[in-house]
Amino acid sequence: MCGPVITIRTQRSLVVIYLIINRSNFDLTTNMAAPTREGTANDVLDVRQFLEGWAGLVGNSQLQKHEDDDQEAKIANDMSISREMVEELASVCSTDTLLCGSEPEEGNLTAFPEVNLLTVRCQEESVQKRENDNIFRTKVSRKMRYKYVQTLAPPCQSEGSIECPIKIPETFLDQEFQVIGSNTLTDLRDKYSCVADFSVPGEFSEDPDMPQDNRAKDLFKSGFFFIEGTFYNDMRYDDCRDYSKVIIDWAKEKERGLGPYTSAKMETTRFVDLKLRLGQPYVYLHQGECEHLVVFSDLRLHGADDPQDAKAYPLLVHKSKPRRQLCIACQTMTARWIVHGSPLAPEDPSHFCDVCFKMLHYDKNKKKLVEFKAFPFLDKTAVF
Amino acid sequence: MVKERVYTPLAGVLVDMQSFVEEFTATESVRYEQFAEIWREKKMSLIFCGRQTERELKEFTEDMFSVVLQYLGSSQTFQVQVAGLFLLYGLYHTQPLKPKAKVRVTREQFQSILQFHREVKNQGHLDVDYVFQKLKIQRAFDFVANAHPCDILQATHTADDDLNKDSLPVEKSVVSEILQPDNIAQLATIHEQYVEMKCRLAGRDRPDTALDVIQPDIVQYLTRAVASHEEWRKTGKRLQKKDGGITSESEAESDVEHPKPSVCHGRKRASIRERAFSKTAEPSRGRRHRRATVHNGTEQSPTKSPPKKRGRKSSRVESMEEQEVLRVPTVNLREEMRSVILNMPRLSGEEKVSKRGKKSKTESMKNTRKKEIKKAPKEKGQLKEKIAPKGKSKVKLSKSKQCTPEENIPDPH
């Protein structure tokens, strides 16, 4: 992502917007995107239209789980033939007819059998190349579409009906969620965990044992999603601020060629109301300046093989495991403090675990030994 | 040698699927037994073998489904569509992934599949119908907006793509992309049908001369023209027009008439080098430790030059080198320009010229020279000393700087 970083200072908060401007001028004014370097940006999808477009084509039988034991009766019914015919057909077209006898066993799928298929030969070559060339191996690993494979979610007890059967997996680049059409944007916001939300503001060097109970999440509750030219602000609480007003006014001011942007409420917008592009990065901003990219990667009908409980959504499907920040002193414990300007510390700023921090900077009377500033630090791996 | 580091999970799939469909259509039957026989004989269930991880397998399976779905499109013949459906059934069931990867269908694709299903029902093919019902009941389809899930990483250009390019990309010709073998085959069949129709109209073996509106051998003419163009792009000379098309004699002939391009190049380069190395350049004070000496036609000049200049110079010289690749044969023009520039006396006043003027080269040289000076000035007096004798040193230094990139080119002689 290249492009100028535009910083807007307001009296209260520092808002930084990265305008992703590709070489061919992504036009934010209209909904048409010029071709990017890799390919064309996808078209805008209306989620509701997508859902309604499938009406009549797809029957409930394919979306909901039915009792599987009487498939044949069902097929006989659909095909308007007798059950005996269906059984005969079943034997003719059974999956056993597809086996050639030399299938590899369960665990041995990586081996290359002797078979006259160009696909297998090419794959063999590719694997050989990967073994010989490290760069190619890492490149292949990075270019693969799936970073992980989902395991089946355990079957849910309660049978809540899904109101708008659409699933939208979306990636926050470190966490992946699946949402259904009836979820609101605030549902997603609440499920997404960011370190900034749980951090404790304040300087603690005078009294490190002061209780750390005021989380930033409770102090600064505002946030917005920026999707296709509209800012969806979270206005559930009285002290929530409209972050987007500054940006909208700024975009109106000069001939920047931006906007006009609109704003809406996050808590009343459901995913089925949205218009979005797949693969297009959108922005989630909270805590004044903590930005995250949100990408909608897929849009499909909710099926019988997906978890059926509506309350389970937004469903966290994947969370990346970042490396934890170690204490600079012991290199063993996870850091709990970040220290600025301490002459005793090897770097500025440094991360310390609780034990090392107190041992280094305080005497036995719990008095500060040198001049420094200490802030509580919460590692990404500590947030669930 | 360019190392192709491209990840192609679907390498070979199209070939295998195509051969399967061809074999199936050759049987002229739409029965499942025929399909199963060919499937077993080809051992298609082993197509999934060799994928190293589950994620690789998943991507491969889904991509393969999307390839097979093309055979189910409404523009295909009925038999090809049946083959496609059977293939889907076979691949869906023999895939080793657990839970099974689903077949992603967009609305348009599913509509054409349903249309095909209606036709199947009308024609009364029970086994085909059954196969489709089975796929539906097992929920093999996933109803999506886009054929593939879109990840943000695919939309950005990664830096290592550039780093992996070991050589300059070969310029592709649009002409050869348009006239692919498939297109030419189609064109040939259409032309045959056209000629046949004209013959039938005339009632004789030959079409009526009144209907002669196109070239009689249009396909050969086109292929010859394209081949000749390709040859010209590669070697810089046109093929001789022969009735039978391109022959090796024509190439040999043209070789005899004109000397080989590499020989031409060698001579030209040698002459430039001679002219350039006849005088040595006065290096800047910052480069005092590296004195320019002339021996055996090579010169040790400071190898450190600003990358911009190096890039520009080397690209200019390389462009001469890669004449075979570039389309515009402007060797002689460039030669003349260079000789003019080298011998041109430097004017004291600066004249504003357009970017593409001759003088821009010297100006840019001067700018980069100034940058070099600014890098290591010890005293201010030295600076003035350097800038003052603009005339001579400019020309000399430009020559020496020109020599540097040439040095990097391996001498073929």
Image (cartoon, rainbow, N blue to C red):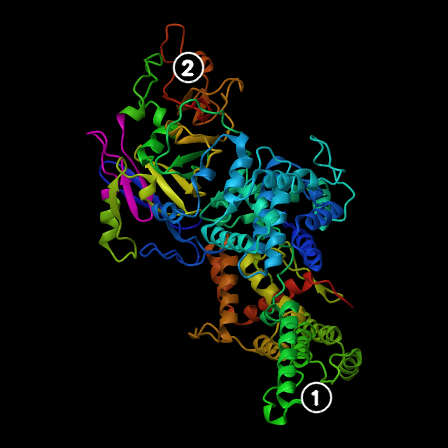
Q: Which mark is residue A198?
A: none
Residue in front for this viewpoint, B142 or A202: B142
Residue in front for this viewpoint, A3 or A293: A293
Q: Which mark is residue B205?
A: 1
Dot 1: within a 10 Å radius of its alpha carbon, few (fewer than 14), some, or many (20 or more) residues? few
Task: Name the chain under label 2.
Answer: A
- Where disc 2 sits, the SS reads helix
Number of on-image labels: 2
Can you say which quadrant of the picture contains the C terminus of chain A? top left
Dot 2: within a 10 Å radius of its alpha carbon, few (fewer than 14), some, or many (20 or more) residues? some
Specify whether A358 is left or right of A246. right
Amino acid, disc 1: Asp
Viewer-side label of 1, 2: 1
Above or below, A15 relative to A66 = below
Horizontal and vertical percent for residue A245?
22, 43
Residue in front for this viewpoint, A360 or A56: A56
Q: Look at the image and say whether residue B319 sits in the magenta stretch.
A: no
Can residue B7 be seen in this snapshot?
no
Quadrant for residue A380, please give it: top left
Q: Which mark is residue A361?
A: 2
Amino acid, disc 2: His
Residue appearing at x 49%, y 64% in the figure: B367
Specify whether A357 is left or right of B71. left
